[in-house]
Amino acid sequence: MRLIVISTMILMALASISTATNKAALTEDLMQHLETQFDQHGHQTGLINSITNNNIQDISLNHERVVSHDDHFSHRLKKSGITNQKGSGRCWLFAGLNIFTPDMMTRLKLNSFELSQPYLTFWDKMEKANFFLEQMISLRDRPSDDRELSVILDNPFGDGGWWHYVTDLIEKYGVAPISAMPETKQSTSTGVINRLANRKLRTFASELRSMHEDGQSEDKLRKRKEEMLGDIYSLMVYAYGKPPTSFTFRYEDKDSTVSEPVEFTPRSFYEEFLADSMPQYVTLMDNPTKDYDRLYQVKSSRNIVERSDLSTLNLPIEKHKTYALRALLDSQAVWFACDVGKANYSKNGIMAADIYDYNSTFDMDFTISKRDRVLYHDSYPGHAMVIIGVDTTLDGQPIKWLVENSWGTDRGDGGYWYMYDDWFNEYVYFTIIDERHLDPEDREKLKQDPILCPVWDLFYQALRKLR
């Protein structure tokens, strides 16, 4: 009798599971219902033909928005010339150096000038490798599936970076003109060398952890780390060439006057041309998923061991625009991070929130708030550029912003983009502003004790991959 009762209970449980599964399944009845519902909209053959045979962005392009566009700006900064990061993820570095070159061009009366991105990339990669290996030593007791360790192992040698990577590298290593260390095949197409370096670094991570398990001291691990860095240095020299310790700088100005050759080191070049003109920049964020008017800091968000992690003040987007406008009117370009892949008509270089009308194309609502886009992984800051101009109404309200990109001259309008104010609201997440342009109450907020964010915070993982 007891066996019968147990068997009955098991059958009832299985039936319950089956019922629950059927409710969750994509059943034939449900599919028939969805098909009927679709057919009730009437004849849609034309729409099906159009969408299946054409580029969706082309048929969704907002014609009225394109026609109403103009390329006039009430205020423009000096252009430094469009650069091209090509097949690399160095937008943060290109944008960062593009902030500084116009001042040098003015000082030296040059028509064009470019600082060496490969020079700073070389040292960025060495610093990232050193920081990674130091983290492996620091986390040597963690299990292999530890959450923090997993994030760090994801892409230790990636191209991605952040604004303070630029300034920290410049202050430590100086700068050089592009002629002193030009691009190479590997610096402009980094996929293979990055994969090889990542493999070496992960192999080194395994070795360091094995040494620890064998009872070797931290000093011995660090001594081995120095030997490991020799392999990474060799890889970088093979791919980029040796970074210059000195170089001769000579130039021809707008008046066709050729300067005398002068010998510089990267440090002395920085001291001569940049050190006295670098404002006190601060990082502002618009992240609607976090409390505004608070200072945040992200663990391990640096490339140089001895430097500080990223600290950023979260402010509503309207304040970003206010401060960006002040900076431009003070002849300062603005570095910013955004979701460049959204609402971007790259053929004409127009970034406008409604440049594509997908709602009309598909007869459905694709509206989602900025907060939910971040919270549900629909949008993140994946690219950095520079604002060099603004067009305003008669009462000073911004209409659109002139953006200098690093994708060469074949994209956008000769390499420039027109960022309309509604796009700024929706897809800009970070701006870098000279602290003196902030209102006193916001400068005071920079003195707060920061709220610490873990390395797995999704918003900040995206920052590490700015490309």
Image (cartoon, rainbow, N blue to C red):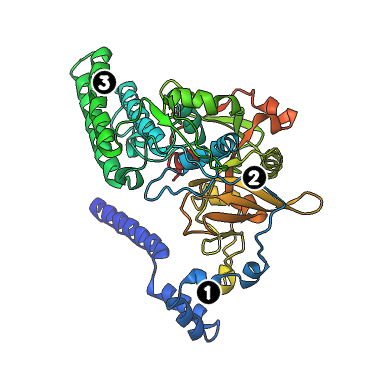
- Residue 458 appears in the rendering: no
**Amino acid beneath label 1:** Ile
The residue lying furthest to the right in this view is 395
- Percent from the top left, x then y, of residue 98? 53, 41
Residue drawn at point x = 52 percent, y = 59 percent? 412
**Nearer-N-terminus badge (1/2):** 1
Element marked by disc 3? helix
Which numbered tag is attached to residue 77? 2
For the residues marked 1 and 2, what is the alpha-carbon distance in whole angstroms?
35 Å
Q: Residues within 10 Å of mark 2 (few under 14, many from 20)?
A: some
Contact check, label 1 and label 2, Cβ < 8 Å: no
* Closer to viewer: mark 2 or mark 3: 2
- Percent from the top left, x then y, of residue 425? 64, 50
Residue on which disc 3 sits: 226
- Percent from the top left, x then y, of residue 119? 39, 34
**Amino acid beneath label 3:** Glu
Dividing the picture into quarters, in which one does residue 89 lie? Answer: top left
Q: Quadrant of the N terminus?
A: bottom left
Residue on which disc 1 sits: 59
For the residues marked 1 and 3, what is the alpha-carbon distance in whole angstroms?
57 Å
For the residues marked 2 and 3, what is the alpha-carbon distance in whole angstroms?
45 Å
Residue drawn at point x = 44 percent, y = 39 percent? 464
Element marked by disc 2? loop
The residue lying furthest to the left in this view is 214
Q: In this rendering, would 295 be left or right of 272?
A: right
